[in-house]
Image (cartoon, rainbow, N blue to C red):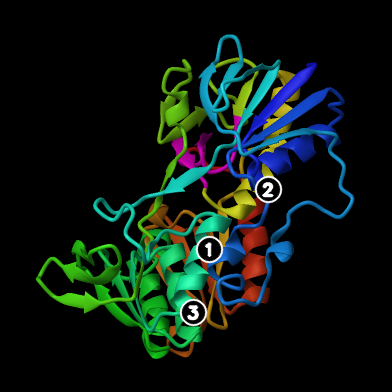
Amino acid sequence: MRTVCVVGASLAGLLTARALRAQGYAGRLVVIGEERHRPYDRPPLSKDFLRGALGEADLALEGEGEQLEAEWRLGVAATGLDAAARRIELSDGGTLTADGVVIATGAAARRLPGTEGMAGVHTLRTLDDARALRADLLRARRLVVIGGGFVGAEVAATARELGLDVTLVEAGQAPMAAALGPDMAAPIAALHERRGVRLLCGTQVAEVTGGDRVDGVRLADGTLLPADVVVVGIGATPTIAWLAESGLDLGDGVLCDEGGATSAPGIVAVGDCAAWYDPALGRHHRVEHWTGARMRAVVAARTLLSGGIERPEPPRPAYFWSDQYDVKIQFIGHPHEADSVSVEAGDPAEGSFLAVYRREGLPVAVLGVNQVRLFTRWRRQLETAPVQAG
C-alpha cells in the first residue's frame, strides 16, 4: 500500500494510525478529522474536565514529540465514499483516493427533538460540548439530566460535586441498568440518592420547556421540573450517514468481521462506528468504550496490511469503567447473556462489592465497585477463558 487514509481523528483513528506505523507501514498516511482539535481523550469530559480539575492540554492523546509522519486534514469531514474505488469525498469539495481506508468516524449524541438552538440544553460528546456545558454549570443552580447511562450518571455526579441541585430522569428501572442489568444497577441508584441526586426512574419526558433558553422539563405525567441547564444523555448513533451510498454493508454501524474487515477489500472500520462480529455472541455489535478502541485498533491495522490473510485472535470481552463521586465502577463481559448474578465480595449497601454474572454456571461478566484488586483478577480470568460460540 502506498496511501492509507484514516477517516476520523479521535482515539480509534489515532490508535490505528499508530498501529499501522508500528506494524511497518511506511507509506503516505492521511488522517481526516471533522473537528479542528488534535486527538483528545473523551472520558474526562464528563468528570475532571467538567469540574475544572483538568485543562484542555491535559486531554491530549499524542505524546510530546510524537511523530507519525502523517498528513492531518482537520476541520474537514468525509461526506461520501466509493468503496470499490476507495475514493473519499470531502466537505471542502476535494477527494482523496487511497489503497487502504480506515473508517473511524465514531458516533454522535442523540438529541431531543424540539431542543435545537435552545440555550442551556446540552449533549456531551466533544470538547466543544464540554466547554459549553462547563460554562453553563458555573452559572447554574438547578440541573436536570435526561438519561441515566454513562454520560448522564457521570454528569449528575460531577454536578453534585459542584454543588448543583440535580434531578436525573431515567426511562428505565435505574441508572446504568442497560449496561449492568437491573439488579446490579440498584446499588448505583442508591449511590446517587445518598449523594443528593433526585432520581425519577421509569419516567418519560414529554417536552423541554422554555423560549430562547430552557427553563424546565415537563414529564409525561405533567410534572414540571424547573431547570437552569438540561443535559441530554440518551445514547449515541454511529456516524455512518456519509456511507449510505458507499456500497458497504451497514447496520447499527459498519458491519465488519471479527478482524475489522468490511464488506469491501482494503477497507476496515474501528471504534464507535464499527459493528464487529463477535463469535461469543453470534452477532455483530458495537463496543463504545475506550479499551475496546485500544484493543481493536491493533487488530484492524493488521487486517488492513495483511489483506485479511492474518486472522485475529478471538476478541476479548468488552471492558469499561466509570468514575462517579469517589467510586470506581468496573465491568467486563455481557450481562444480558447471564442467567444469574451473585455478590461474591463486599456489600452493595456499603458501596464496595464484586458481583459475578453466570450462564449455566460459567462466568460471563463481572462487576466491581471499589474492588479494583479483586476485579483485576476476575478480569484476567475472563480475558483468558476460551471463547464459546454464541
Q: Quadrant of residue 308?
A: top right
- In this view, the residue in front, 220 or 215, is 215
The residues colored magenta run 269-287
In the visual, does 189 lie left or right of 304? left
Is disc 2 in contact with disc 1, using a CB cutoff of under 8 Å? no
Would you name the residue on which mark 1 appears? 130
Tag 1, which secondary structure? helix
Q: Alpha-carbon distance for marks 1 and 3? A: 12 Å
Residue at 45% across, 60% down: 358
> Does the magenta segment cover residue 348?
no
Q: Residue furthest top?
A: 85
Dot 3, crowdedness within 10 Å: few (<14), some or many (≥20)? Answer: some
Would you name the residue on which mark 3 appears? 138
Q: Is residue 34 above or below residue 352?
A: above
- Residue type at mark 1 is Ala
> Residue 294, labelled with which disc?
2
**Camera-side mark, 2 or 3:** 3
